[in-house]
Amino acid sequence: MSRKPFLLLALLASANAQNVTHRWTFNTTGGQANGTVITDVITSAPATIVGAGAVRNGSVVTLPGTSNGNVAAATISAYLDLPNGIVSSKTNLTVELWATPVSAKNWQRLIDFGNMNTAGTGEISNTAGAPAAGTSSRDNLMIAECRGTTLNDKKLVGRNDGSAELGAENTLSTTPGTEYHYVLTFQAGVGANPTTGGRLSWYRNGTFVSSVDTNFRLSDITDVNNWLGRSQYTNDSNSNITYNEVRLYDYALSPAQISANTTAGANASFPAPAVDADSVTMLHGRKAKLNVLANDSGEIVRSSLIVQSPPSFGTATVSPDGAILYTHSTGTPTNDSFTYRISNSTGQTSTATVAVAFSSSLKIANPSLNVPSSPPATAYSLPNALGTLTFSQPLCLVTPPGETKRLFVCEKGGVVLMVPDVTATSPTASPFFDLQSEVTGRTNENFLSDGESGLLSIAFHPNSLSASESFYHADRRSKCRRHRVRADSHRAARRLQQSQRRGHALRHGRLSLHLRRGRREWQRRPHLQ
C-alpha cells in the first residue's frame, strides 16, 4: 500500500516572547534639520525630524514647541514622524517611551497616531503645506501630556472613522525637566466590546493610570500620521518634550513587565532570551513546521532567528513567519536534531536544540490538540421555512425560471397554491389553480387522488416570465385544457378551449401545468397506457 506525502504541521500556541518591532534610542550624533532620519536599531525603520528647532545631543532629541499644527512642514515646530502602518499592522500593541516634558504647551501630545479629517487618506506628508486651521482627527490613539495648558492634566483617547472620542482624563503631578516612563498598550478581544474592539491602557512609571474600551481594532485605524510631539488637531500646540527612547512591541506588555522596564530604565541592555528545547515526532520522508519561539521568553527579535547547526538527515529552513520547517530526506534514522539561535535588540544571543523522533505508526499523538472526551451538547431544530403556512400533501415545489420570490406548491389533492413572496416576514399563500373544483360535477369526468393518482407535479414554460396562459393534462381521461392567467391577479382564469384525446389515459394520473407565451407551448409528454 502506498501513502501520499503529507505535511505534518507542529503548530503550537503563539509566541510568549516580547517581540520588539521597533526601537529608537536617539543616542547617536547627527543632523537635526528638517528631513533628518534616525533609524531604529531593529529594522532600520525611519523616525524623521519634520520642521525646525529640534536639538540632538547624542543621547536624546528635544522638540521646541514653538508653533501649532497649522504650519507648513518646512517651518513647523519640529516633531518626529514614524512609519505608516506601525499600528494598524498589529493585533495587539505596546508603545513604550522615556520622555521629559520641558514645559506646558496647549494640548501638547506625547504621541498621536492616526490621520486627519481631510480629503483622501488624511495623511500630512513631510513636505506638505499648512493643513488649515481647525482641522481635527478622523482616527487616532493619543496621550495628551497637557489638557489645555495644565501640565498635570492628561488625557487618553481612542477614535475611529470620525466617531466620538473615547477618552479618559487624569491628573498626575508632573515636574518639568523630569524624565518619566510611559507605556500605552492595546489588547484586542477584551473589555466591553470583545468581538469588535479591545482595551487601550496607559501607565506612567510602572503604575496603571487609566483605560478605555474601544469598539474598533487596530486594523480599523488609518495610521498615516504616526507622530511624536504633534497633534492631529491643527489648533493644538506642537510639543516641547525631550525623547530618550521609543519602543514598539507586537503584543501588550503585562503590568509586571512594565514595572520591570521602569526599573531597568531607558537604553537598557536586555538579558539574553530564555530558550527551551523543542521536539517533534514524525514519519520518514515527511515535513514538520515548528514554531520554535512559542516556548521561549524574554525580549526576542524574530528576524534574528537562524539555524545554527543543521540536521544530519534532512534540512531545516527558517520561514518568513518565524517558524522552522524541517524536511527529512536521507535514510531511515531513529532520531535527528538541529539547533537554532535567536538574539535580542541589544545583541545578546541564545541557542536551543530541536529533537526529531521518527515513528512508523499511522497515528501520531499531537500534544497541541485537546479533544474533549465527549462531544458537546448540540441542539437541532427544523423551523418552518414559511412561517405559519401549512400544506396538504405537497408533492412539488417550483419557482418559475428567472424569478426569486414566487413559489408554487403542488398539492396531491388537486390544488396549486402560490406564495407570492417567500422572503416576506409572514408569507401568505392563495390558490393559483384548483383542478379538483374544475373537474367535479362534469359529466364523465372526475378527479382521483387516491393511491398514486392525483396532482403530482407542475412545470413552467422557459419563458414563463412573459407568459399569460396555463395548460394542464387531467388524469385518467387525458383531456387537455388551456387556461388564461389574469394579469391583475396572477391566477388561472376561465377555460378557453378543450380538445379530446380518446383511447388513452395518463399513467398514475400525472398532471403537468405549463405557462405559455402566445401559441408556442412547452410541455413534457405524459406516459401513456
Image (cartoon, rainbow, N blue to C red):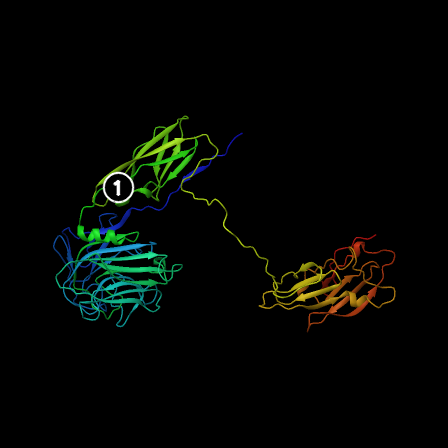
Task: Determine the residue located farthest toward the bottom in the rendered image.
Answer: 488
Q: Label 1: few (<14), some or many (≥20) within 10 Å?
A: some
Position of 365 relative to 141 (above/below)? above
Q: Is residue 25 left or right of residue 141?
A: left
Q: Residue at label 1?
A: 274
Q: Is residue 223 visible?
A: no
User: Where residue 478 appears, x then y in whole percent?
Assistant: 82, 59
Q: Nearer the viewer, residue 4 or 192?
A: 192
- What residue is rendered at 21% in x and 65% in y? 145
Q: Nearer the viewer, residue 248 or 374?
A: 374
User: Where residue 424 appears, x then y in whole percent?
Assistant: 59, 67
Position of 148 relative to 339 (above/below)? below
Quadrant hosting residue 510: bottom right
Q: Is residue 447 left or right of residue 237?
A: right
Q: Is residue 518 left or right of residue 21?
A: right
User: Where residue 518 appears, x then y in whole percent?
Assistant: 73, 66
User: Where residue 492 appears, x then y in whole percent?
Assistant: 73, 68
Q: Is residue 365 left or right of residue 95?
A: right
- What residue is rendered at 38% in x and 61% in y? 193
Q: Quadrant of the N terminus?
A: top right
Give the number of marks: 1
Q: Is residue 306 visible?
A: yes
Specify the amino acid type for callout 1.
Answer: Ala
Quadrant hosting residue 396: bottom right
Q: Nearer the viewer, residue 205 or 306?
A: 205
Q: Nearer the viewer, residue 80 or 302?
A: 302
Q: Secondary structure at mark 1?
A: loop
- What residue is rendered at 36% in x and 65% in y? 161
Position of 277 relative to 143 (above/below)? above
